[in-house]
């Protein structure tokens, strides 16, 4: 899952630098959301 989060961050940066700023911001919000779910499920084990 951490590799997925890392790839989301990389894709977001590529989109941002290519000029698709709104798409990059939208995708960038996925990374902390996934990390938050990971922490939540880890705490409930």
Image: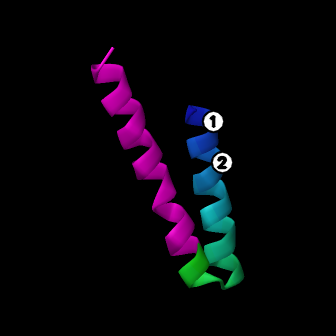
Binning the other alpha carbons within 10 Å of mark 1 as few (below 14), some (14 to 19) or many (20 upward) gives few
Q: Give the percent coordinates (x, y) of residue 9.
A: 57, 55
Q: Quadrant of the N terminus?
A: top right
Q: Nearer the viewer, residue 16 or 39?
A: 39
Q: Is residue 36 above or below residue 40?
A: below
- Judged left or right of residue 21, residue 29 is left
Residue wearing tag 1 = 3
- Judged left or right of residue 44, residue 18 is right
Q: Does the stretch in magenta take in 26? A: yes
The colour mode here is: rainbow
Q: Secondary structure at mark 2?
A: helix
Q: Are marks 1 and 2 in contact (CB under 8 Å)?
A: yes
* Residue 17 in which image quadrant: bottom right
Q: Give the percent coordinates (x, y) of residue 42.
A: 36, 22
Q: Does the stretch in magenta take in 20? A: no
Residue at coordinates 69% horizontally, 67% vertically from top-left? 14
Q: Is residue 43 above or below residue 15?
A: above
Residue wearing tag 2 = 7
* Residue 13 in which image quadrant: bottom right
Give the magenta part as a residue range. 24-45
Q: Nearer the viewer, residue 28 or 37?
A: 37
Q: Is residue 13 above or below residue 35?
A: below
């Amino acid at each position: 899952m951490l590799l997925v989060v890392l790839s989301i961050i990389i894709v977001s940066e590529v989109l941002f630098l290519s000029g698709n700023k709104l798409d990059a911001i939208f995708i960038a919000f996925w990374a902390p959301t996934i990390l938050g779910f990971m922490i939540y499920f880890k705490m409930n084990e």
